[in-house]
Image (cartoon, coloured by chain):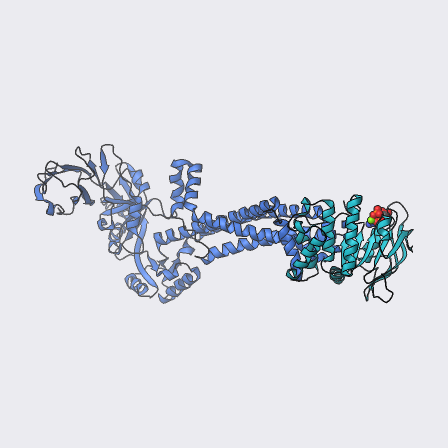
Amino acid sequence: MSNQEQDTVLEARGLSKSFSIVGAADLKVLNEVNLTLKESSSLSIRGDSGCGKTTLLNVIARLEPADKGTLFWGDRKIDAVSKPLATEASWRAKHIGVVYQSYYLIPELTVLENVLMSVRLSGLPITEYELRARELLEQMGVGNKSMQIPSKLSGGERQRVAIARALVNRPQVILADEPTGNLDERTGAEVMNLLLSSCTKEKTSLILVTHNPSFAQATDKTTSLKDGTLIYE
Amino acid sequence: MKSAWPLFLAWKQLFPSQRKVSFFSLLAIVGVALGVNVMIVVVAFMQGFQQKFRSDIIDAQGHARAVPLQRQLEWREDSQKIASQPEVEKVSAYMQGHLLLQNRDYHAVPFSMGIDPGQSDGVLPLNQFLKKGFIPVQGYDSKDVTPIPTTDSLEDDVVFITQQVANRLGVRAATVLLLDDQNFSINKGRLVVERLDPYVESDEWTIEFLSGDQYNLRNSLGSIDLNGSLEQIASDLGWGYPKFKLVEGITPLSKGDRFRFQTFRSSILEIYSPTMIEQAKSDEMAPPREVRVGGIFEVPWQGFHTDALIGTSRFMADMRGEENACDGFFIKFKTDYLHDENKLGELCARLEGYLEGNWRIIPWFVENAWFFDLLKFEEYLMVLIMIPIGLVAAFAIAIALMTTVLRKTREIGLLVAMGGTRFAVGMIFCMQGFIIGSLGALLGCGLALTFIRYRDVLMSFIVTRIAGEDGQAGVTQFYDFYSLEVPYPWESEQSMMTFLTFIVFAVGVSTIAGLLPAWRAARMNPAEALRSE
Ligand SMILES: Nc1ncnc2c1ncn2[C@@H]1O[C@H](COP(=O)(O)OP(=O)(O)OP(=O)(O)O)[C@@H](O)[C@H]1O
Ligand SMILES: [Mg+2]
């Protein structure tokens, strides 16, 4: 499916990151990591627990500064070492969607309001996106729960809502960090299929962190993170 | 609308979807409301007291007093000069000093004031004071039917005294009792005493009906025994005799109906003045002046002398042995000058200039500054005590919001990951403080308005509970709650200011209380927040 002529939506060059540990040597988590993500393509990252996958996603999303390296968000060049800026936050709101292992839905809001939070944060008009939000929920199979509060949903349902939330404002990239980690195998497979198919349908690029080899195989490119470097398989 | 989402989330955290209200926000809002309510009510009531004392004082001594800087022989002209000013409503000259009163072995030295009885509707509402001081005699087989004395009976050898002086000397004004009647019926016509002057003797009066419209009127002293018809019943026997009047009832009076009244003459006081002592030194011992007690008065302003006597100015002049004396004027201005103290002060200064500096004109608020300073001080002290209480409420809000921040660490991380700036994330908590403050202030104002609306019910409840039925009389002597004027904010600028001040205070303090948690949230490292368990 991938096409070499397609635009690059995300690129990382020479990302390095280490954490200082009290009473021990520095822990080098990322070491000169390079990564390129094209428009409408998907990439999976596998790796042992604690190898630095979440850290990599955080650095890419500029939630955490790196020690070294450069990022390209589309054609916007960012020094990955600097402290994250407020202007980057608003770019992130519009262009990056996130899905985490624990769903992080806001308990005070209904399912629909949760989905629409992305729209609010990116400063888009709510009324114009409400229909789309309902359609996405429908597509995720939780259309009938839109007025429920998250605490009344099952884990699988919550993650479906979280995926709808990540997609609703049409971001260019979705960063998914073990989205099925808390789900049983069957539900996990269902949710993963939904995530992959919606990304394809919405033409949204995806970086998927997962432990499950069969989920990883479903993406355009599979990589694994080992000793701080990203190995393309 | 880009920046509106923190407000949206702040609102939703206080009032979550699918639930009416969160327990925390309810408590916080009610807490703020109670604080605002108490502060407004205390200040508004204090201002109500001040207002009440103000009007009592103005009743008791007018808006200003003119005091001569040296003896003024031309005071009558000056009085007319003042009265001719367009701003001036009334001017009453007075004389004052102390007199020694004696009844048998009892003595009193009240503050004594002489006023012109022709000016009974002058600056001092003396008739009102007489009404307030009137206490009927209790009797088990008779009823006190004494009419309330008026300034009509203020003659040169009649004085009015306060209850304290009367008690000390064991004296009273003329009194008349209606003795119980066997054939009494509510429906029947009644005879009432319309006038009882200070010269009425102790006596017993009988009015007996010979037929439906013929009666016989007689007294036990035997000086009066006459027959009359109903048309004449209002006939006036003259000064020194009670004047009766018929109040018609449903069933007409008939033969055999009888009314008996017992009159008691007013006490006679012997009065000595300082001038008499001077005369005594030169061996011209003058006999004391004898006067009758015309009535008991009470001045509503407690700062007025409790031991006091009011007589005519001629009486005071006689006692002082001075002709043409005047110790000052009470001045009452037209009502525009009642509220604006600055304007009143300026006016007094202008009048002083107009009178060529011979008189000092002291406005009421200068004369009673000690008292109002005290009241103001009390008000400020209350506010000073309440502010820390308000701050305690703010601390409670700050702590509750801080807990929320900690509880919502991962949500905060997510909001940043979704593209919220740290500033905006902080705003969520700041705005919660703001919302709590605003709603609390609103509710508090509503409560305060309810308090002001039902203050009488509330106050009588509090006073009877704390002071008991007996103590209530004592408390109301100073604080007449039942007539306390507490204006609504739309009625007075001062009240509006009170409301606004405490609204701003509550909203401000609650918002500031939200700042610390907001700062805590904004400072959070999103990556760590997302990792936190
Ligand atoms: N703020 C930090 N300070 C110190 N060490 C950290 C910090 N954040 C992460 N680490 C360490 O960095 C390493 C990589 O962590 P990371 O969460 O990226 O791993 P991961 O690959 O996502 O693991 P998992 O699959 O279990 O989620 C871990 O050993 C972790 O202990
Ligand atoms: Mg991880």
Q: Which quarter of the rendered picture does the C terminus of chain A lie within? A: bottom right
Query: x%, y% of residue B436?
Result: 59, 51
Label total for image: 0
Residue A123 figure quarter: bottom right
Q: In the image, which lettered chain appears cyan?
A: A
Q: Is residue B139 above or below residue B65?
A: above
Q: Is residue A69 above or below residue B461?
A: below
State left or right for residue A97 relative to residue B155: right
Query: x%, y% of residue B25?
Result: 60, 47
Q: Nearer the viewer, residue A33 or B312?
A: A33
Q: Which quarter of the rendered picture does the N terminus of chain A lie within? A: bottom right
Q: Nearer the viewer, residue A6 or B110?
A: A6
Q: Is residue A222 something one can see in this rendering?
A: yes
Query: x%, y% of residue B209?
Result: 10, 39
State left or right for residue B199 relative to residue B90: left
Q: Is residue B480 something one can see in this rendering?
A: no
Q: Tell me, what hue is chain B? A: blue
State left or right for residue B434 relative to residue B530: left
Query: x%, y% of residue A113?
Result: 66, 53
Q: Nearer the viewer, residue B461 or A125?
A: A125
Q: Nearer the viewer, residue A206 or B4?
A: A206
State left or right for residue A126 relative to residue A173: left
